[in-house]
Amino acid sequence: MPSFADGAVTHRDFLRSAFQSMLRARILENKLSSLYKAGKIVGGVYLGRGQEAVSATLGTALIQGQDVFAPLIRDQAGRTAFGESLLDCTRTYLGSLQGPMRGRDGNIHRGRPAEGIPAMISHLGSQVSVVAGMLFARRLQGKLDGCVGATCIGDGASSTGAFHEGINLAAVEKLPLVLVIGNNQFAYSTPNRRQFACADLVERARGYGIEGFAVDGTDLLACASVITEAIRRARAGHGPQMIVARLLRLSGHGEHDDAFYVPQNIRNDHYGRDCMEVATRQLVEHQMVTSEEIHAWNDQFADEVQRAVAQAQQEAPPDPYHEDWTALSTRFPLPLRTSSPSTVRQPAAQPVCS
Amino acid sequence: MPSFADGAVTHRDFLRSAFQSMLRARILENKLSSLYKAGKIVGGVYLGRGQEAVSATLGTALIQGQDVFAPLIRDQAGRTAFGESLLDCTRTYLGSLQGPMRGRDGNIHRGRPAEGIPAMISHLGSQVSVVAGMLFARRLQGKLDGCVGATCIGDGASSTGAFHEGINLAAVEKLPLVLVIGNNQFAYSTPNRRQFACADLVERARGYGIEGFAVDGTDLLACASVITEAIRRARAGHGPQMIVARLLRLSGHGEHDDAFYVPQNIRNDHYGRDCMEVATRQLVEHQMVTSEEIHAWNDQFADEVQRAVAQAQQEAPPDPYHEDWTALSTRFPLPLRTSSPSTVRQPAAQPVCS
Amino acid sequence: MSVTYIDAIREAQETLLRDDPRVFLYGQDIATFGGAFKATKGLAELFPGRVFDSPISEDAMIGLAVGAAIEGLRPIVEMQFADFSSIAFNQIVNQAATHFYRTGIPIPITVRLPSGGTVGSGPFHSQSMEGIYAQYPGLVVLTPATVSDAYHMLIDAVALDDPVIFCEHKFLYRWLKAKSINGDLLPIGQARIIRPGKHATVVAYSAMVHEAVRAADHLQHDGWEIEVVDLRSVKPLDINTVLASVARTGRLLAVGEAFPWGGVTAEVVSRVTEEGFHLLDAPPQRLNARDTPVPYHPKLWAAHRPTPESICQALRKLLAF
Amino acid sequence: MSVTYIDAIREAQETLLRDDPRVFLYGQDIATFGGAFKATKGLAELFPGRVFDSPISEDAMIGLAVGAAIEGLRPIVEMQFADFSSIAFNQIVNQAATHFYRTGIPIPITVRLPSGGTVGSGPFHSQSMEGIYAQYPGLVVLTPATVSDAYHMLIDAVALDDPVIFCEHKFLYRWLKAKSINGDLLPIGQARIIRPGKHATVVAYSAMVHEAVRAADHLQHDGWEIEVVDLRSVKPLDINTVLASVARTGRLLAVGEAFPWGGVTAEVVSRVTEEGFHLLDAPPQRLNARDTPVPYHPKLWAAHRPTPESICQALRKLLAF
Ligand SMILES: Cc1ncc(C[n+]2csc(CCOP(=O)(O)OP(=O)(O)O)c2C)c(N)n1
Ligand SMILES: Cc1ncc(C[n+]2csc(CCOP(=O)(O)OP(=O)(O)O)c2C)c(N)n1
Ligand SMILES: [Mg+2]
Ligand SMILES: [Mg+2]
């Protein structure tokens, strides 16, 4: 049986921590939704509602400053758990110059790559090989020991060539990549049956020669158990791990979408339940949290969110007149010859192929 | 047990026919190799030596004029079996204006798409979705019944995103696509262990929700049994079929390559054997052919090949001064208004979204 | 009663599905959902078995369309955003575009690219890729700027036997309205003088046509008469109409929303200087977006792309030469 | 004793691996096999654990390089042929190219593209993609034409903090030889006057530099002195050197091997006419490949790309203006 223990963190602490991240994310995302509906956020707002258990578990089990976490579209909870500040979120959504993206990119397209959080591009599947590359580089530098790199992806993104190339490459290189597929049954409006033909995406793992786990993504305890075990195995050198979490997206694709296409019977079935409610019940029942604590956290997080929003709102937006309108870090023209070393480099030896 | 019978074709006829295509291809390819080495062919020459049993079986089991066959780089035998004339090959390699590619494209990049043989582009994996599209179109037109579409691909090409997207799409659409992966253990110089991490690529089938077969690609009888069964299943509506044939490429990647990187032990092992020899032995033992017949065929095919080469060599090359240097079938400028119908089209009804 | 640009695109697809059994639609979320921009709203119900939701597989989506075209059909593929066509790049430029030249079999597919910037869309939902695709032989690249052109040119695109990259501007989708779709037809490959003038020629296409017209209207107050040419099709490019205009005005400004290196405006300027050097009274100029990814923040975005103000500024400089 | 262009590229990679622990090589068949063109021959043995055979996954190859660059390494990725970079297109133009602008973290990767036509290579092993990549903000696009530049510019490419698309010409690989790699360094972004002259300027890059020089040599017999400018880098583009040359000659012909719509030659002509209109005594001209896929047959191929003969012809027309 997998255990939650990862170093010094006990089962109880882990779950409380993951639960807090779920709650914080839910409150933050509710706020983002209202801001969007009030016209205060331009572009789109994409929520992880219903997917917090999976995402928070992952973010909690990863070690900030050591691991890589490449969140995707529905990972507010995982970001929070991994240590991303609420301000990074609100500043990015609200276009503050102080945010990590400085108004140049928005919403969930944020990250701090130098701190182990790549900033996703929109093109689904593209982050898999990037995380593999980060791990590959660490191995080359002798710094990989004990690290893992995790990324999340949806059922829809599993149909991309980038997903396939990335996971296959990670398998060939036997990298400690943890790939969490959140199968929320829809890609935008497209149901699973128009996306893949296997019974469960976890059946893909074997074809890549990697280990695979299926988990009920609405069940925090199950997620904690399975995801920590997968991460443990990746850390221990078992190579890439694929986790397929089944659940339902409890929002529209974005806040512009009312998800009319999700049939009632799917909403009503087991996977349509809200992981927040399940987790609350589970942790209260197991006496890991009390309702009083939850209330207090609710207040505390609402307050934190409020402050993060207020601060980002009052911060200066980027100024096009002071913007550095170059996409390069190199400043051309280069001063004469400084791009080349002072001495003329000559080939080391006889050319091999002459 | 699968049977070779496909309609009226008996087991014996099938095998003799496949064997003849193998032989014809081998003789043709030996000739292409000499022409290349004599500097008579520019560009590259890519041979299917060692892969004739798989390819010929496939081409023989498919029905010309009804099925689609998208051959790849090592499918001379399959092309011959499917009915491609030797002249199509020699004319393309030698750049004759009479060939299907009219000197515009060369070597194995030839086809007759309107006759069910797409002309491959170099980019590996790209033909899978094209064949899927041809089948998809036939279904839309109500013409799919009983048709299959087959394409071949290498172990290396299984790492492409195009392969993944194509086969997954075919699975979602439940198309009668037969995908033959010739795992010849190398992609150019790259061994399987740098290409994928699963034990056998056939393990991928399940993850796509399709049926998979593994076969010894050096064994004509095994190939005939497995491939005809897969085709039968595709024809019968079981959806895409994946066949992984294990074998060894018995030439360099192209005729410029001496394959120094293929270790001796791999050449010596079971899959290093020559399918031509195996097939000869098998058919002679089963008294399906006699050595005399084989000798006669050898002479006959050598003669056919010789004539196909001679004819292509004496034909005119394309003439740049008479070449139609446009990549479009449309001739611009279009005469005024003829690209539009004579009457002004008005939207049929009220716009739905206004 | 008015018709928007997106209505026109939807209507064209309805017309095509109704009139031509060879047409089918393939793309992400285009069936039940009616497409991310509702360009196919209701069509799946109207035409059962002709409108398909695809997996998120842009490469295979184009591969499928090419295969279907080989078999004689006329698929219209919707990319959810032009930017995602980068995934289908190989199938478009190498498979579809080379097919006729190589085999003699044309590939009549239409690839719809919701293109260009809108507020808050950022680097990956704002790109204008016409100048990328136009570089490849074997493609026709269309950029309708008006409601009627959106309709008629999409109909024409499907009628063409060659692969067409159909660049629709997302900003125009709901912003641009017309009373009705008019019968002012021009063949594909012919540009339109959308606003006559005599002091300078602005060559533009897609959304920039409207920005250019605004700039021209503005300069009218100062007595300048600016001619605006809407290219309509960037490949083929109707250089004759452009040259005739420059012959009248002697001055050329080419305006595009794409990145500034190369692309449509460079092709226009080069063609004009090669063929109509003697017509020019002043150095021809280009105005494009800035050389950075398209920024998210509305303030940055507004300064990233050409606007009526920056077009006016460029025109004043040109007129003062 | 001589050094070929491909030797220089191999040497540069050896130097880089030796001098910079951040460098590693990733690509198809580059380890044991030493690469399809032997650009990495022997390097896997010399530098164990630094040269890797990749799966046939161009998209993931670039993704991996981007990830490694984030971690501080300097990967060099070999595409087996430039044409196959179409599969990595999205990772190059959207992931690598936008990263610095978006996040402030530069992506120092070098993508080696064996480019251009050779006899019998056909539509998918002959492409010149510099004009495609140069359209995207955030990329540096280099096109060395000489043995020494092949060496020094590859060293410089890896030193740059930005993603570099390094377009090597396959035709030059073994055909172009030098006595040795010389110390005639120029910084990236600076063009070189490779042949001085006074009657007309030919701007070229990569293999076309040599065709242009041959054409110039030929016209010398008739008394024409043609200046040939080797751009070296197509983005950034050293317009100052080009303008200075045109100021001397008054005439411009831009020659490229890529497809004729847009691309490098259009950018050159546009920049010169925008900024140096008054310098021109004749309409600037372009000469590119034809607007079809690159044909397989040597006779077609020879008529598809610019040659000394066609360059001479274009120059005579230009000189006669
Ligand atoms: C390559 C690519 N194609 C299309 C899109 C547009 N798009 C954005 S999210 C999305 C649906 C994603 O579905 P899924 O992967 O299941 O993730 P979910 O949103 O359900 O979490 C689509 C089609 C994209 N971002 N990238
Ligand atoms: C996308 C792409 N990348 C690289 C190449 C170059 N290339 C041509 S054949 C080949 C090896 C193919 O190996 P495999 O798929 O195993 O087929 P085999 O040659 O062994 O039959 C490579 C790398 C290509 N054609 N397409
Ligand atoms: Mg989903
Ligand atoms: Mg192989």
Image (spheres, coloured by chain):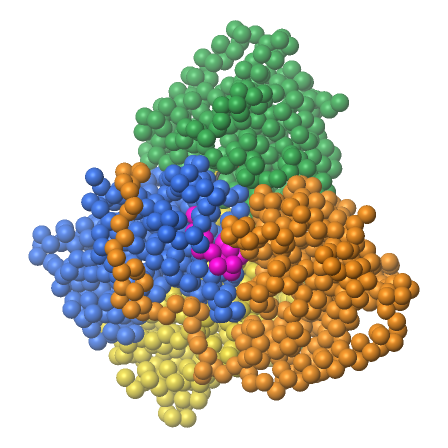
Chain colours: A orange, B green, C yellow, D blue
Name the image quarter holding residue C201: bottom left
Quadrant for the C terminus of chain D in the image: bottom left
What residue appears at the point 67 percent right and 65 percent down from the top-left corner?
Answer: A82
What residue appears at the point 53 percent right and 51 percent down from the top-left corner?
Answer: A142
What residue appears at the point 57 percent right and 23 percent down from the top-left corner?
Answer: B271
Q: Is residue A100 above or below residue A39?
A: above
Quadrant for the N terminus of chain D in the image: top left
Q: Does residue D77 appear to the left or right of C274 in the view shown?
A: right
The stretch in magenta equals: D61-78
Q: Does residue D247 appear to the left or right of B330 in the view shown?
A: left
Q: Which of D59 and B276 is in front in this view?
A: D59
x and y percent of residue D99 in the render?
A: 50, 65
Q: Which of B319 and A81 is in front in this view?
A: A81
Residue D109 shows in the view: yes
Magenta stretch encompasses residue A37? no
Magenta stretch encompasses residue D64? yes
What residue appears at the point 62 percent right and 11 percent down from the top-left corner?
Answer: B288
Residue C28 shows in the view: no
Q: Is residue B337 above or below residue C313?
A: above
x and y percent of residue D113 in the render?
A: 40, 50
Residue at the farthest front position: A8
Q: Is residue D23 above or below residue C312?
A: above
Q: Nearer the viewer, residue D32 or A8?
A: A8
x and y percent of residue D304 in the render?
A: 32, 48
Name the image quarter holding residue B51: top right
